[in-house]
Amino acid sequence: MDRLISLHNAIFAPVERLGDQVIPLLARLIFAATLLRYYWNSAGTKVWDRKGEEGILDFFTLESGTYAQMFPKAFEAAGYNTANMGFHHDLIAIAGTYAEWLLPLLIVLGLFTRLAALGMIGFVTVQTWVDVTGHGGTLGALFDTRYGLIDERALWIVLLMVMVIRGAGVLSLDRLFGLTPVVRQVPA
């Protein structure tokens, strides 16, 4: 039995050491492949007028649909008139829209990855709350046989937690700029 354990440890010790750097890199690649365009397209719906007349200044203006997406009940109560929305709604809408571009970009580049992933966890949490309370989405339940909103968002958050805990991995601007602390393994 001791030989089997020694063989196991000899095989998987290098894999575990490699995993410390590869797992966060893979998490960033999966994020880029599955969620980057989702969030960038979502942010785009908040600024592009969809009339084929987009210009560079459209990046700095919000479409009225932004308020319908982010504050559906408040926007309805305001008679679907953006002028009737409060300044705090404008501030939240602007910050949320640009966060949908900036935070995913930082994650993909591996720059300030831990902070960006933490920001995305907050974003996903607020997004889920709005989907349920504002748009009538059904949260669902964990540990049932259905795949619902809670299942999807829990997977997203776990992916982001890998980056919060482990950082960006080997190929990252965090590593290049020395923003990743080097953890020295103490021999057992």
Image (cartoon, rainbow, N blue to C red):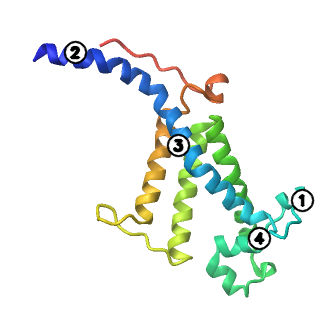
User: Which residue is most to the front?
Assistant: 52
Reading the image, the residue beneath label 4 is: 87
Q: What is the C-alpha distance between the residues marked 1 and 4?
A: 25 Å
Q: What is the C-alpha distance between the residues marked 1 and 2?
A: 62 Å
Q: What is the C-alpha distance between the residues marked 3 and 4?
A: 37 Å
Q: Which mark is residue 7?
A: 2
Query: Is 95 on the left or on the right of 113, as rendered?
Result: right
Mark 1 surroundings: few (<14), some (14-19) or many (≥20) residues within 10 A:
few
Q: Amino acid at mark 2?
A: Leu
Residue 175 position, x and y percent, is 61, 24
State the SS at label 1.
loop
Reading the image, the residue beneath label 1 is: 55
Mark 4 surroundings: few (<14), some (14-19) or many (≥20) residues within 10 A:
few
Q: What is the C-alpha distance between the residues marked 2 and 4?
A: 64 Å
Closer to the camera in the image, 91 or 53: 53
Reading the image, the residue beneath label 3 is: 30
Q: Amino acid at mark 1?
A: Gly
Q: Earlier in the sequence, mark 2 or mark 4?
A: 2
Q: Earlier in the sequence, mark 3 or mark 2?
A: 2
